[in-house]
Structures are given as structure tokens and as C-alpha cells.
Image (cartoon, rainbow, N blue to C red):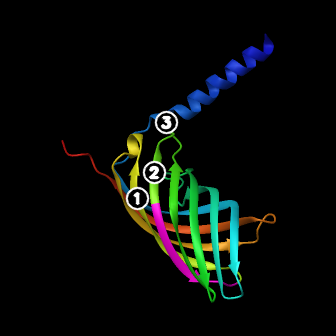
């Protein structure tokens, strides 16, 4: 009985604290900057010393510089592929970002760069759709991604600096 009471009290406290976050009206447009931290796994197909193809899946968290906004504390899921020819990286893929309220934002990205220590790529992101309150999202931004020391064999880690702009466009009736 004591455990049920404690659990009920905890749920009540958390709902009071979280209610303003989830009931807050979402802005219809915005700009901002953020940092993303990612880790995941990859498959690498090497073709001698000058060429390779890498396909990867990653998961991360995006934290805005202001500590608020549409993408603050979102959880991106990334699926991408890059080719590396003579040290030059060309990379592209898709992102599904889950927002704190559970809505999703769908994006594509393209980037390029140079292998090195760390490998660095610069690119663009384009918002192509969303669900719930993010339905009708348009816009995009720029990012720089830095490779980090991998946490384990067959895994990767990276850090991104992002500048973005977006707008929710109501569908025409």
C-alpha cells in the first residue's frame, strides 16, 4: 500500500511539473541553433585504399542553445550512407526527429567533407514533413558534423552544430 501511495505521489508531482511543457502552444515558425550528439552502428565496404562505402544508423539528442523551442530535447533517428573516394566524403540520408510531445519531424540531409582527425563534414538539412503539431513543417538549415572517438568496435560517435529555420504551413483547403 505504501508503494502504491509513493508511486501515485510521484506521478502527480511529475504531471504537475510536466504539464506546462506539454500544454504549451507551439510557435508557427522559428529560428535557432543547437548541438546534436549521436552514436550508432555502421557497415563499411572498402574497395582497396582509395574508395569505401559506409551505411549507418544513428540515434541522438538535440539540445537548443536557448534551452527551449521546437527541437529542444528532441531525439533524432538517422539513416544514412556515405561514399569516400580519395579521402573526400559525400554523405546523405534521412532523419526522423521525435519531439518531446511525441510529434515527429521528417528531414533529409546532404553533406560533404574531408577525412581527417577528426573527420569533418558540412551540409544542409531540409524539413520535408511532420506529424501532429509539426504537420506542414517547411524550412531547413546548415550543420557542421565532427567525428568523435568511437565508443566501441563497429560503432561511431559524432557531434553536430546546427543552425535552422522552420515554419508550419497550414494545408490549403
| Residue 125 x %, y % | 45, 66
Residue 14 image point, x, y percent: 62, 30
Q: Residue at x 41, y 43 (%)?
A: 131
* Closer to us: 16 or 62: 62
| Magenta run includes residue 143 | no
Residue that label 3 marks: 22
Relative to 84, is 143 on the left or the right? left
Span shown in magenta: 108-116
Q: Residue at x 37, y 47 (%)?
A: 27
Separation of marks 2 and 3 at Cα, in angstroms: 17 Å
113 in magenta: yes
Mark 2 in CB contact with mark 3 (< 8 angstroms): no
In front: 22, or 120?
120
Q: Horizontal placement of 50 versus 69: left or right?
A: right
Residue assigned mark 1: 127
User: Is the residue 162 above or below the residue 127 in the image?
Assistant: below
Residue projecting furthest to the front: 47
Q: Of the numbered discs in the image, which one, if any, rests on residue 157?
A: none
Q: Earlier in the sequence, mark 3 or mark 1?
A: 3
Horizontal relation, residue 173 to residue 116: left or right: left
Mark 3 vs mark 1, foreground winner is 1
Q: Where is residue 70? Give x, y as percent.
A: 45, 50
Q: CA distance from mark 2 to mark 1?
A: 7 Å
Quadrant of the image containing the N terminus: top right
* In contact (CB < 8 Å): disc 2 and disc 1: yes
Element on which disc 2 rests: strand
Which residue is labeled 2 in the image?
Answer: 105
Which class describes the residues within 10 Å of circle 1: few (<14), some (14-19), or many (20+)? many
Q: Residues within 10 Å of mark 3 (few under 14, many from 20)?
A: few
Amino acid at each position: 500500500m505504501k508503494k502504491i501511495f509513493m508511486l501515485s505521489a510521484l506521478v502527480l508531482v511529475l504531471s504537475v511539473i510536466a504539464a506546462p511543457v506539454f500544454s504549451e502552444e507551439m510557435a508557427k515558425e522559428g529560428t535557432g541553433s543547437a548541438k546534436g550528439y549521436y552514436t550508432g552502428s555502421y557497415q563499411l565496404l572498402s574497395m582497396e585504399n582509395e574508395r569505401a562505402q559506409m551505411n549507418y544508423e544513428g540515434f541522438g539528442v538535440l539540445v537548443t542553445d536557448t534551452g527551449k523551442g521546437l527541437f529542444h530535447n528532441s531525439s533524432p533517428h538517422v539513416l544514412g550512407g556515405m561514399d569516400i573516394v580519395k579521402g573526400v566524403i559525400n554523405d546523405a540520408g534521412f532523419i526522423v526527429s521525435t519531439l518531446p510531445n511525441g510529434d515527429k519531424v521528417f528531414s533529409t540531409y546532404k553533406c560533404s567533407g574531408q577525412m581527417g582527425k577528426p573527420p569533418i563534414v558540412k551540409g544542409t538539412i531540409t524539413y520535408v514533413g511532420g506529424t501532429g503539431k509539426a504537420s506542414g513543417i517547411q524550412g531547413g538549415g546548415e550543420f557542421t558534423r565532427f567525428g568523435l572517438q568511437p565508443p566501441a568496435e563497429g560503432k561511431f560517435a559524432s557531434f553536430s552544430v546546427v543552425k535552422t529555420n522552420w515554419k508550419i504551413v497550414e494545408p490549403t483547403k
